[in-house]
Image: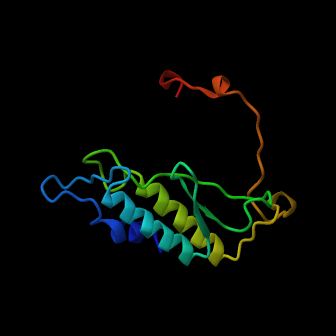
Amino acid sequence: MSVTAHLADIASIGRDATSGGYSRLAWTDADLMLREWFIGQASGLGLAVETDRNGNMWAWWGDPSAGDAVVTGSHVDSVPDGGNYDGPLGIASALTAVAELKRAAYTLADPSRSPASPMRKVAASASPASVRVSLQEC
């Protein structure tokens, strides 16, 4: 499913008929409906979905303790009267990317050992203070 198809699928959830904006505040009916939608979409891709103690949802492709992973993140909730892309765009993009990787028969093996793979592992260690960037530096 494409990003636009995912967004069309959820376009009515949390939409205000008067303003046209979206109110998908955390733990409201709209947020819970989007969480159920996410579970269905992720499960349909063969991902194992779990929710942690803080309510964050994780959709795993493969064994999360195995060491190889692809990580992306977003949120399904929104600010009051936000846009349709507020949060769900990241989710729709991630689901579409996983679907395309699976369609291409990509495996979660170490890509740095495959000369055909454009992906490489990157690791870094830094303190939170060292990675803060002010808006002026962006």
Image location of residue 89, percent across then percent down: 43, 57
Q: Say which of 116 and 39 sits in front.
A: 39
Residue 99 in the image: above or below residue 28: below
In the image: residue 112, left or right of residue 62:
right
Total marks drawn?
Answer: 0
* In-front residue for pair 125/50: 50
Q: Quadrant of residue 99?
A: bottom right
Residue lying at 78% horizontally and 51% vertically, measured from the top left? 121
Relative to 132, residue 53 above or below: below
Q: Is residue 11 left or right of residue 68?
A: left
Q: How is the image coloured?
A: rainbow
Check the image and name the residue furthest to the right: 113
> Considering only vertical position in the picture, is 87 above or below 134?
below
- Residue 134 x, y percent position in the rendering: 52, 23
Along the horizontal axis of the image, is 19 left or right of 76? Answer: left
Q: Find the residue positioned furthest to the front.
A: 53
Percent across and percent down for residue 127 are: 70, 27
Q: Where's residue 97, x and y in %?
A: 57, 65
Residue at the spot 54% in from the left edge and 77% down from the top edge: 44
Q: Residue at left 32%, top 60%?
A: 30
Residue depicted at 15% across the width and 60% down the height: 17
